[in-house]
Image (spheres, helix red, strand yellow):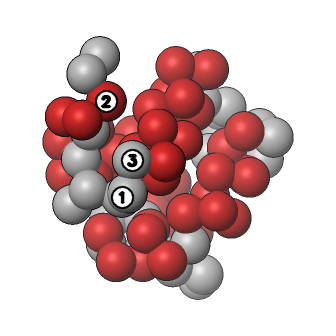
Amino acid sequence: MDSSALSYEKNIRPLFTATDQAHMSFMFDLWSYEEVKSNATEIYDAVSNQRMPPPPKGPWSQDQIDTFKTWMDDGFQP
């Protein structure tokens, strides 16, 4: 994947399910670019250490984790 093409709307937002959104709504809105950007370090820590997302979906694949990290490293494109 061309990392320069990674964006929140196209690549990151679809990683979060309605269950994920509901589960985390007490802390932040996973469907909000600004809130995900502001909390990206915490989100990355949770997904890379398999504490998020909750069942039934369970942990992200390494590819999903890498996509999120690349999005962060490339400047959080909207």
Q: Residue at x 74, y 52 (%)?
A: 45
- Kindly identify which numbered label has been placed on residue 3: 2
On the rendered structure, is 34 left or right of 57?
A: left
Q: Quadrant of residue 43?
A: bottom right
Disc 3 packing (10 Å; few <14; some 14–19; many ≥20): some
Query: Mark 3 and 2 residues: CB-CB less than 8 Å, in contact?
Result: yes
Q: Which mark sits nearer the N-terminus, 1 or 2?
A: 2
Q: Quadrant of residue 47?
A: top right
Q: Residue at x 54, y 29 (%)?
A: 66
Q: Secondary structure at mark 1?
A: loop
Q: Which residue is mark 3?
A: 74
Q: Secondary structure at mark 2?
A: helix
Q: Could you tell me how far apart the alpha carbons at marks 1 and 2 are, in whole angstroms?
A: 11 Å
On the rendered structure, is 55 left or right of 20?
A: right
Query: Mark 1 and 2 residues: CB-CB less than 8 Å, in contact?
Result: no
Is the N terminus in the top left, top right, bottom left or bottom right quadrant? top left
Q: Secondary structure at mark 3?
A: loop
Q: Nearer the viewer, mark 1 or mark 3?
A: 3
Q: Which mark sits nearer the N-terminus, 3 or 2?
A: 2
Q: Could you tell me how far apart the alpha carbons at marks 1 and 3 are, in whole angstroms?
A: 6 Å
Query: Mark 1 and 3 residues: CB-CB less than 8 Å, in contact?
Result: yes
Judge whether residue 15 can be spotted in this image. yes
- Picture coordinates of residue 22, whole percent (x, y): 48, 66
Residue type, numbered disc 3: Asp
Q: Residue at x 64, y 51 (%)?
A: 44
